[in-house]
């Protein structure tokens, strides 16, 4: 089991789930409010399952998810961006789903059955995220504003994948390979998100009770 | 001494928390039941990984087993063994009768993309939204009987 790869996957899904959920209640149309909320819920569910796999049956997945220092997160900078602008939001969803499909497909062939089994389960749900992203990609393709968003986010999208998987992303997205914004570096937009998502754990170290 | 069949019967009484017309057994999420020395071991596979009903289902199973006078051990298995093809024929009919279009078998869905209206049976339906009230459902509209309906996603 390649723990760093799995931790990167879980952190990506947790943070993107968080970012997507920021549309709940304010998406430009009701259908998208529902779609983004559902996708966010699925992504955070995937993150939880991967954290649980990493900590084992007696471990604490919440501790792994929320008790790390900011610089210890292994997410790709793409998912950190706080983008309350629709063209960029859709560009990120589409780029992320294309990259994520390449990564999940590789994990489905992992030699560890716990990893390949979970990847296959995640893949069944992701099929609907891809359908949603492709629908929007078809609708906005050729719009200058969407194209600009894709180009701006492209170096970030490359950073979702390790170098050996980027060739497929390049051919599917159809943009020339550029220098990637690599995993392990962080944008300034992570700090406020980290503050928010770890707040309950930090304020109640013994465990919050409701 | 509790018998395995009694456990299955008891589990059949637990409704899905979000679609209560169908039981956990109908939903096909219970992979195995094993009874040993007063302990009941249940292997359970989630439907969707982010489903908020998972904890509720787990607690309901534990409660049912305790009512039978045994000690429950429920383990959640996050592998690929659950898909909508695991929903039983009875379960599918219960969904349809309640106005939820049951998920088409996976192979059929991948090839045909046909979705039937649960009210009139027409295949003249269109997708309104890939997502619905829960991650496992889509929203469709029947152009024959003009009824909007929820479609259980095939996964």
Image: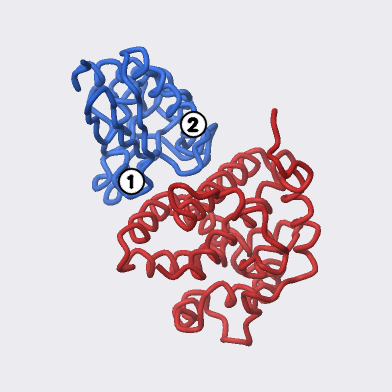
Chain colours: A red, B blue
Q: Which mark is residue A150?
A: none
Q: Quadrant of the N terminus of chain A?
A: bottom left
**Going by the image, does A86 lie left or right of B97?**
right
Residue at point 37%, 51% (across, down): A121
Res. B144 in view: yes
Secondary structure state at the residue bearing disc 1: loop
Location of residue B118 in the rendering, given as x and y in whole percent from the top left corner: 35, 24
A12 up-or-down from B135: above or below = below
Location of residue B121 in the rendering, given as x and y in whole percent from the top left corner: 31, 25
Q: Are marks 2 and 1 on the same chain?
A: yes
Q: Earlier in the sequence, mark 2 or mark 1?
A: 2
Residue at point 57%, 81% (across, down): A175
Q: Nearer the viewer, mark 2 or mark 1?
A: 2
Secondary structure state at the residue bearing disc 2: helix
Residue at point 64%, 75% (across, down): A184
In the picture of the structure, the residue carrying the numbered disc 2 is B55
**Going by the image, does A116 lie left or right of A183?**
left
Identify which residue, A169 or B45, lies in the foreground: B45
| Label 2: few (<14), some (14–19) or many (≥20) C-alpha neighbours in 10 Å | few
Name the chain letter of the residue that bears numbered label 1.
Answer: B
In the picture of the structure, the residue carrying the numbered disc 1 is B113
**Going by the image, does A194 lie left or right of B80?**
right
Q: CA distance from mark 2 to mark 1?
A: 33 Å
Location of residue B149 in the rendering, given as x and y in whole percent from the top left corner: 46, 27
Residue at point 30%, 50% (across, down): B110
B88 up-or-down from A76: above or below = above
Q: Quadrant of residue A29?
A: top right
**Going by the image, does A124 lie left or right of B104?**
right
Location of residue A48 in the rendering, given as x and y in whole percent from the top left corner: 53, 49
* Number of marks present in the image shown: 2
Name the chain letter of the residue that bears numbered label 2.
Answer: B
Identify which residue, A168 or B56, lies in the foreground: B56
């Amino acid at each position: 089991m390649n723990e760093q790869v799995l931790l990167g996957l879980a952190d990506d899904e947790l943070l993107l789930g968080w970012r997507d959920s920021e549309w709940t209640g304010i998406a430009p149309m009701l259908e998208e409010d529902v779609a983004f909320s559902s996708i966010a819920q699925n992504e955070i569910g995937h993150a939880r399952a991967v954290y649980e796999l990493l900590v084992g049956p007696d471990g604490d997945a919440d501790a792994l998810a929320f008790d790390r220092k900011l610089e210890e997160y292994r997410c790709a900078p793409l998912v950190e961006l706080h983008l309350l602008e629709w063209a960029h939001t859709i560009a990120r969803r589409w780029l992320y789903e294309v990259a994520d499909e390449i990564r999940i497909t590789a994990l489905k062939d992992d030699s560890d059955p716990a990893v390949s089994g979970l990847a296959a389960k995640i893949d069944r749900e992701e099929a609907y995220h891809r359908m949603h992203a492709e629908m929007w990609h078809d609708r906005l393709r050729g719009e200058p504003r969407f194209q600009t968003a894709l180009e701006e986010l492209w170096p970030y999208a490359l950073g979702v994948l390790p170098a050996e998987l980027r060739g497929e992303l390049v051919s599917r997205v159809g943009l020339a390979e550029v220098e990637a914004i690599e995993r392990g570096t962080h944008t300034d937009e992570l700090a406020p998100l980290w503050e928010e998502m770890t707040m309950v754990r930090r304020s109640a170290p013994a465990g919050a009770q409701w | 001494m509790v018998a395995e069949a009694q456990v299955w019967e008891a589990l059949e009484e637990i409704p899905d928390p979000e679609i209560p017309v169908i039981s956990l057994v109908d939903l096909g999420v219970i992979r195995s039941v094993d009874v040993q020395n007063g302990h009941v071991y249940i292997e359970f596979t989630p439907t969707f990984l982010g489903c908020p009903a998972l904890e509720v289902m787990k607690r309901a199973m534990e409660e049912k087993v305790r009512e039978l006078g045994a000690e429950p051990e429920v383990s959640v298995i996050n592998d690929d063994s659950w898909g909508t093809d695991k929903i039983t024929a009875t379960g599918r009919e219960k969904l349809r009768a309640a106005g939820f279009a049951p998920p088409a078998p996976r192979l059929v869905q991948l090839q045909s993309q046909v979705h039937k209206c649960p009210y009139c049976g027409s295949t003249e339906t269109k997708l309104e939204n890939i997502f619905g009230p829960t991650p496992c459902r889509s929203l469709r509209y029947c152009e024959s009987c003009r009824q909007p309906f929820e479609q259980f996603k095939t996964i």
